[in-house]
Amino acid sequence: MMNKTDRDFYALITEIASLSEKELYHRMRTAYSSVPRETRKSCIDFFRQFDYWGQIDEENGNYEEIELKQEALSAHLDDFRGVYERLSDFRSKRTLYSILSNWYRYDFVSTSETREYLFDDYFDHDLLKCGSAEVIADLGAYTGDTALSFFENYGVESCKRMYCYEMTPDTFEILRKNLEPYENVLPRQKAVSDRPGVMYIKQNSVSSSANTLGEAGSREVEVTTLDLDITEPLTIIKADIEGFERKALLGAAKHIKNDRPRLLISVYHNNEDIWKIPEIIDGIRDDYSFYLRYKGSPIYPTEITLFAI
């Protein structure tokens, strides 16, 4: 017998699978049009500011964001079903259901129900338990907010060493100052990917936390891999690096295979990471348990974290 979460998820998948691509797009457009005008405007502004998922421009008939979501649902239902069946608790399963329901029918109720309110980002105490000698790689360390949150949640004494990677120079200086009192923190002004080299920073006009890497630009940044840059065993890897999470995991394959660190990975910068990143991790070693949590807006769920424990 299936419980309510399973019934709701499989009913949703079955309904979407029964639709042609054209029918699915039409239903998604209709659902979007039923959203209050002010809410639609906030979505349009959000997608314009953070260019990960495509744009919506109603005046010019551009619904790229909806088209891309429809394509992801049409092409990858089996992949979404597969990751659902790999998730290790029903809170995670309900979270995935709420995200896909939001994509398909602009369901804000389910996302409101599953949004994380109790714990800080990455530090769900039911999932992440820390000892006294954690060695942590924080990818996308920004101003040091994750490091400070870790110390608040688990204590400075829980961290033997923390490597904090931040590629944007101005932000890196803030990070360095914020974390200067902590002798066990090692700031690294580098980007992290699947191979070493040089790339360029693409500035986001709203926040440096959303800066991305590219092959061209005016601001160079050194790129490394965790396997090359850190020689000691790792116990935790956190990554929120604006779409480079997959490459960072591939560049940490030896650490993952040999050390089996807990992985706290953002999976919201495109429409495929929710299933592709678990697939990558399983390809390196297949003994992780997967959990899903999110803290973003119920209107458009972001800040989605995959916990591989």
Image (spheres, helix red, strand yellow):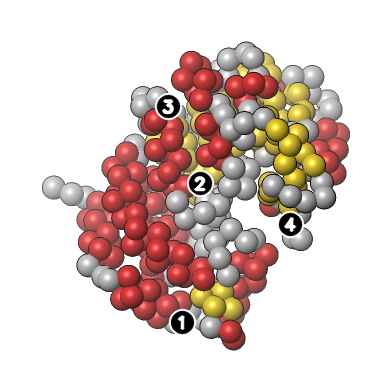
Q: Amino acid at mark 2?
A: Val
Pointer 1 or 4: first along the chain: 1
Pointer 4 or 3: first along the chain: 4
- Relative image position of residue 47 (x, y in whole percent): 60, 66
Q: What residue is disc 1 on?
A: 33
Is 211 above or below relative to 63?
A: above
- How far apart are labels 1 and 4 at the CA level? 29 Å
- How far apart are labels 3 and 2 at the CA level? 18 Å
- Relative image position of residue 168 (x, y in whole percent): 78, 43
- How far apart are labels 1 and 2 at the CA level? 27 Å
The residue at the point 58 percent across, 15 percent down is: 233
Q: Amino acid at mark 1?
A: Ser
Q: What residue is disc 4 on?
A: 204
Regarding mark 2 in the picture, which secondary structure is present there?
loop
Is 215 above or below relative to 59?
A: above
Q: Which mark is residue 284?
A: 3
Regarding mark 1 in the picture, which secondary structure is present there?
helix
The residue at the point 44 percent across, 82 percent down is: 34
